[in-house]
Every structure is written in structure tokens, then in C-alpha cells.
Image (spheres, rainbow, N blue to C red):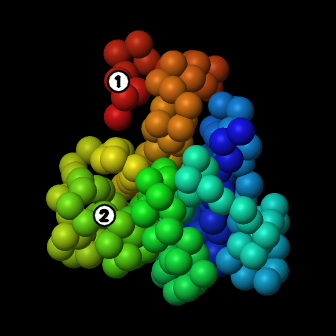
Amino acid sequence: MKKSFVFLANGFEEIEALATVDVLRRAGIETKTVTISSSLQVTGAHGIEVKADISLTEIECNEKDIIVLPGGMPGATNLAECSQLCDLLKQHNNNGGLIAAICASPAVVLAPLGILDGKEATCYPGFESAFSNCKKGFKPVVIDGNTITANGPATAIPFALAIVAQGISEEKAREVAEGMLVYNPQQDYSF
């Protein structure tokens, strides 16, 4: 069964992380929140404390699994400074595994690792300077190959639905969206 791992670091953007976890679980994807520190308690950018399911040292990730990086500051910076996570991201990318990042994380975490090189991507406005080796996308959610990027908190649900569409199917993304009352027959869930 496909699994997803949503990585949390102190200063993460709460809505991006928790909305994504909610949507992925509604879709039936086994989803674990993962702390990069020794404590399961993680504090978001707006002071909301969350208890992660597991720590980074406990995960077993294969190329069929999905890695998700919420943004937020300094959460994205804290993710980027975790060498074990960066090594995992590079390996997962080399194996063609699905990687999704939102807000500051595409620019702060993925771009410096070369994961977005030659791809189209988006990020939180003002962080685009990190995109020197990729094409700046102007849609709220951008899919290119094995990467999904989104631009910020307002796109958390479309971002999560894009992960469902790529991880399972567009039909499942529509089903989940409809159940959450965000379904719009005119919406293209192929992203």
C-alpha cells in the first residue's frame, strides 16, 4: 500500500500540513506526520502544537511512497537544514518517487538540492530567486514529472488534491473534493 510522509519542523505552516494530512487520509492514503527532531512535539508558525506520529529515524520510505513538505518559516529553513531529510529527498527523487512541496519549501528545500532543475515549479511569492535552474510556474499548483509544488496556504486543499490525483487517480481526487464540498464540475483536477 502507498504511504505518505508529511514532514514537520518547528515553524511549519499549520494549514498546509494539516489540511494535506486530512485530504490524504480521506483518500485512503496511509499518512504519517514525521518530525525531524528527537521530540514528537512540533510547534507550528502560529503557535499550534502538534504531536507527530513518528520521527525521521523511524520511517521506511520506498519509491512508491509520497514525501510532502509543508512550508512556513522558519519551518522550511529547518527542513532544509536537516541533512538526513535532504539525503532522503535526493534518493527519493533519483528513484522517481513523488515529492510534493508547498509555500517556501519548493524554493528553500527542493531547489537547492537540484530536485527542481529543468522543471516547472511554483512557490510562495518572493522566494522565486531560488528558481535559477527551473521554470517559474504561475499556476497555484504545478505538477512536473515526480514533483508537485504549490504557492501557499490558500492552495493547501488543491495541493493535497493534486497529490491524491497523482498518487491514486484523478477520479479519487474528484471524489474526495466532492465529499469536502470543494468539487466543481468545471474544475480540472489533472493539475
| Vertical comparison of 186 with 12: above or below | above
**Residue at 72% of width from left, 82% of height from top?**
37
Q: Are marks 1 and 2 in contact (CB under 8 Å)?
A: no
Q: Quadrant of the C terminus?
A: top left
The residue to which callout 2 is attached is 116
Q: Quadrant of residue 5?
A: bottom right
**Label 1 neighbour load within 10 Å: few <14, some 14-19, many 20+:** few
Give the residue type that dot 1 points to: Asp
As displayed, is residue 29 above or below residue 91?
above
Q: How many marks?
A: 2
Q: At 20% from the left edge and 61% from the top edge, which residue is drawn?
A: 118
- First of labels 1, 2 by sequence position: 2
State the residue in front, 25 or 50.
Answer: 25
Quarter of the image containing the N terminus?
Answer: top right
10 Å neighbourhood of mark 2: few (<14), some, or many (≥20)?
many
Q: Residue at x 44, y 62 (%)?
A: 93
Can the viewer see residue 43? Answer: no
Q: How far apart are labels 1 and 2 at the CA level?
A: 24 Å
In front of the other: 151 or 98 = 98
Residue 151 image-quadrant placement: bottom left
